[in-house]
Amino acid sequence: MQHLDEGTIHAWLDGALPADEAADVERHARECAECAVLVADARGMIAGAARIVSALDDVPSGVIPKRPAPAAGRSLWRTLHLTPLRAALAASLMVAAASLTVVRYAPRDEVTPASRSEPTARQAVADAAPVAAPVPATDMIARPRVAPVSEKVAEARRSSRSDSIARAPAAAAPRPLESARPTNSVAVEAPKVTVAVDSAAFRDRATAQTMDTTRSAKSSSVAARREAEQVAVTATAPPSGVRAMIAGAAGRSAAGVGRDVALLRETAGTPPPFSLVLTSADDRPLALPGCYQLVPDSLRSALQLPDRLSLEISTESGVRRNIVRALAQDGRRDSVVAGVSWQPTPVATRVAFTRGEAQTRLSLSQAAPSPMGRGALGFSSSPIRLVRIDCR
Amino acid sequence: MHDVDRLFREYHQPLVRYLTRRLGDRDWAEEVAQETFLRAVKQESIVSERSWLFAVATNLVRDEARKDIRRRRRLELLREQARADEIVDPEPLGIERAQEAALARKALDQLTERDREALLMREEGLDYTEIANALELSVSSVGTTLARARRRLVEAYESLQGQGAGSVARGTHAAS
């Protein structure tokens, strides 16, 4: 067989070759060192190009709404961060607080006979409230009167928040491109999720750094879908969870060589760097935030991931980050895995894990029942399974 | 007549994303996508829906680019001038991410139109046959086209990144 040309290699890696031709290419790539280097290089090109293209999604819209220029100074509404709803809420609370104060502190002898005989608003409030035993003045100071008010504040805040969410879903929702996908398309119909593993060396540090470009922009959309997806999964999947099979897609299973080797040597003595890309083969969103268990095998240990892990969106310190957290045996969320993050890629059905420069690609497929394949990291190549589990 | 709702549900999102990447403007992409779906409604039958939609959208972009290139340049100038006087809400992008997006845009612009479109379609999940149909290529040449596009994109990006790092280094040196 002649040496492989670049177009054939890309077609093979893209899974576009017929099975017999793909088998020939795979065999040749395994036997021919020269072509194996080309294959590794092509893997890097594919991964790098995908990352660069994903960075394009961070473009601002061309039409930016113009704001009226400030006249004399900032308006009081903006200065105080007031909205009509907040102002109305604040006014209501002030009235409620004032009413309660009047009711509680008003001297009994000021109540007129007429008001005693007819139920008044003040009496209604007093009757509804638990009857307090007379307490000394010092006790009254020690037991702040604002307690009921603060409860009202909390309640009002809760109701206000739920109202605003219920009333303005479109306005409140993030506006990623994925938002056009209706929620019902998120439903996971097949209980089994197949995960295909493939590895490719990252071409260099520069392209690796582009991995994070879409994290924040897309994480909100993932979060928005999360709940609906989990409901759908619960409804259709068996209690054991959605099974995920990590397996190399046909035509992508050759072990990386060439550049992969160089990367592994560079990182000798340190945990092997990796990144994973989870992809739905049928272009449907996956309920990726959630808890998983990696079935032990050689590739899992090479990835340096905990056996049980949770993909989460953290908003600690006001910064949204997609973190990976280890899970204890009982399903309790444990410590954050340092240096590892996951991110939705521009294609809504992909999520990438990042650590270091090298790349391992996992393709999640909800369509196929359980195709087995090979995952590869450097020279090692093995199947790996991922099982969705419950956690708390 | 097609099930327009289904077409829209299935293809609007990837089509808009493809167009946004292609055009660099989300609003423009939405407009072109809408026009594409309007044409789909008028179409009696579509054999390969995805490749048809992407082909029509691509042609619309090309047509509009050809027709309005002068007018658009002038509008761009005017818009830039107007922006300078406006108070705008910046998109919530970090500086690094914005820089990466700008580099990616520049790198993509260095590709030929066909390479760019093939690459963006592939990134939207179109298979080789669909790409070939949409771009009127032979299926056997799609692999070569994609290989060339990916290599040029990565090389252009790296080159631009190197230039950026060089200018930063020069700036730092000058500042010190």
Image (tube, coloured by chain):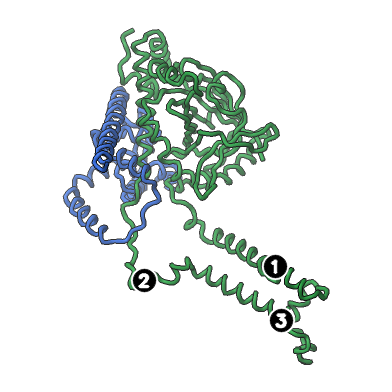
| In the image: residue A235, left or right of residue A186 | right
How far across and how far down the image is residue A105, in percent? Answer: 72, 80
Q: CA distance from mark 2 to mark 1?
A: 38 Å
Task: Tell me the quarter of the picture where residue B7 sits.
Answer: top left
| Label whose residue precedes the other's in the sequence (2 or 1) | 2
How far across and how far down the image is residue A116, in percent? Answer: 79, 88
Q: Amino acid at mark 1?
A: Ala
Chain rendered green:
A
Instruction: Single out the mark in the foreground, 3 or 2.
Output: 2
Q: Are marks 3 and 2 in contact (CB under 8 Å)?
A: no
How far across and how far down the image is residue A247, in percent? Answer: 52, 23
Which residue corresponds to mark 1? Answer: A147
Name above or below for residue A38 compared with residue B2: above
Q: CA distance from mark 3 to mark 2?
A: 44 Å
Task: Tell me the quarter of the picture where residue A188 sits.
Answer: top right
Chain rendered blue:
B
Q: Amino acid at mark 3?
A: Ala
Which residue corresponds to mark 2? Answer: A73
Q: Nearer the viewer, residue B32 or A119?
A: A119
| In the image: residue A194, left or right of residue A28 | right
Q: Amino acid at mark 2?
A: Gly
| In the image: residue A353, left or right of residue A155 | left
Q: Determine the residue positioned at 23% across, 47% down.
A: B64
Which residue corresponds to mark 3? Answer: A121
